[in-house]
Image (spheres, helix red, strand yellow):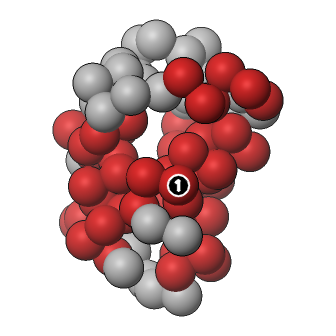
């Protein structure tokens, strides 16, 4: 799986998007566009990235910019591959 596929599946699960996840594009906004995306789901996404990739993500690595768009989140996942 590549970063885009991993990110799509993480969002599908954490936000319970179902088939809506398939329409996400790099420029698709996340924060503010999905009411399901809140502090709890951010924690779930970070935990999912750590589990899926076998890495650790420090608190200092997390910022709001990472969750602005599907593309920024996928780029973060890519950096952890």
- Residue 76, horizontal then vertical, whole percent: 29, 59
- Residue 38, horizontal then vertical, whole percent: 55, 29
Residue 78 found in image quarter = bottom left
Residue 65 found in image quarter = top left
Please name whichever residue, 78 or 43, is drawn nearer the observer in this view of the structure.
78
Residue at the image position 62 percent from the left and 30 percent from the top: 21
User: Dot 1: within a 10 Å radius of its alpha carbon, few (fewer than 14), some, or many (20 or more) residues?
Assistant: few
Q: Which residue is mark 1?
A: 5
Numbered disc 1: secondary structure:
helix
- Residue 14, horizontal then vertical, whole percent: 69, 43
Residue at the image position 33 percent from the left and 76 percent from the top: 80
Above or below, 17 relative to 4: above
Residue 18 found in image quarter = top right
- Which quadrant of the rendered structure holds the N terminus? bottom right
Is residue 14 among the parts visible in the rendering? no
Above or below, 75 relative to 30: below
- Which quadrant of the rendered structure holds the C terminus? bottom left
Residue at the image position 35 percent from the left and 47 percent from the top: 73
Report whether 72 appears left or right of 34: left
Report whether 24 appears left or right of 37: left
Task: Count up the numbered dots.
Answer: 1
Is residue 6 among the parts visible in the rendering? yes
């Amino acid at each position: 799986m590549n970063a885009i596929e991993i990110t799509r599946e993480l969002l599908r699960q954490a936000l319970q998007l179902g088939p809506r996840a398939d329409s996400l594009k790099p420029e698709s906004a996340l924060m503010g566009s999905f009411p399901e995306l809140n502090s709890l789901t951010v924690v779930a996404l970070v935990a999912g990235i750590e589990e899926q990739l076998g890495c650790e993500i420090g608190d200092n690595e997390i910022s709001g910019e990472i969750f602005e768009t599907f593309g920024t989140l996928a780029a973060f996942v890519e950096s952890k591959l």
